[in-house]
Image (spheres, rainbow, N blue to C red):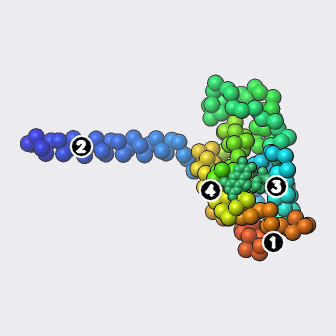
Amino acid sequence: MDVKSFKVLRFVIAAVVAGCVGGLLLMKSYKPGSMPKFGEVKTVGIVLGSTREGRSSDKIGAYIEKILLERNGITVKMLDLRDFNLPFLHDAIASVNQKEITDHAVKKWAEAVEKIDAFIIVTPVYNASYPGVLKNALDLLYKEWNGKPVGFVAYSGGATGGANAIAHLRDVVKELQMIPVHAQVKIPYSWKAFDLQGKLLDPTTQKTVNTMIDQILNK
Ligand SMILES: Cc1cc2nc3c(=O)[nH]c(=O)nc-3n(C[C@H](O)[C@H](O)[C@H](O)COP(=O)(O)O)c2cc1C
């Protein structure tokens, strides 16, 4: 074999080995779970992703709760981050490797999340993403999120409806080995999207809420 052929062969072998190692690493970091069958999701948690005074997530979470309660046999738990007063992640051991949680507030959060079969995350858009308080609440746990379906309801003051918040969240929940459903609820101009009774005005978005719920229940 001449020197040129040898170099080409060496390059091809290195590329194949790098591809295999990369593939194995990817498989290790993300193992997609399988969707629970219809009837297996009994408790749905609504995570309110904003905590600021005067927030809209109360109103939007209440609307989603009302629609969910129209489904037979579903228990709804409101997971309001204000109630948990979570610290910023400060443990030396990352949540993914943590065997035991010692922080009282994080433990309470872990116990609440553990009991839930599927989630709907209600999130505003803050500076083209979702709020930091929500990222921290997600990062604090790991196994409690694993294998559970999740849907998103995003809203924005402007025209996007929080599409970018959902796009960012989808990447994050995949790392937590959750199962993000396909239907996404996006509510633009959230300040004028509801009537005085708290009902969503746009019929297409109302329909998407029900599609997203069907998908997390795997109906
Ligand atoms: C810190 C901050 C950043 C925001 N950034 C955006 C933005 O990038 N795009 C947008 O359309 N609206 C933005 N908004 C408007 C919010 O999406 C809107 O007011 C929403 O109702 C806020 O959610 P909350 O009331 O639950 O806190 C921002 C609001 C805040 C407080």
The residue carrying mark 4 has its beta carbon less than 8 Å from ligand 1 = yes
Q: Position of residue 174 (x, y in %)?
A: 60, 49
Type of the residue with mark 3: Ser
Q: CA distance from mark 4 to mark 2?
A: 39 Å
Residue 164: which numbered mark, if any?
4
The residue carrying mark 1 has its beta carbon less than 8 Å from ligand 1 = no
Q: Specify whether 73 is left or right of 173.
A: right
Residue located 19% across and 44% down the image: 9
Residue located 12% across and 44% down the image: 4
Q: Nearer the viewer, residue 38 or 170?
A: 170
Vertically, is 31 above or below 192?
A: above
**Residue closest to the far right:** 197
The residue carrying mark 3 has its beta carbon less than 8 Å from ligand 1 = yes
Label 3 belongs to which residue? 56
Q: Position of residue 28 (x, y in %)?
A: 51, 41
Q: Secondary structure at mark 4?
A: helix
Q: Position of residue 3 (x, y in %)?
A: 10, 40
Label 1 belongs to which residue? 201
Label 2 belongs to which residue? 11
**Residue closest to the far bottom:** 203
Type of the residue with mark 4: Asn
Q: Secondary structure at mark 3?
A: loop
Dividing the picture into quadrants, the one containing residue 62 is bottom right
Q: Local crowd at mark 4 within 10 Å, few (<14), some, or many (≥20)?
A: some
Q: CA distance from mark 2 to mark 1?
A: 60 Å
Q: Are marks 2 and 3 in contact (CB under 8 Å)?
A: no
Q: Are marks 3 and 4 in contact (CB under 8 Å)?
A: no
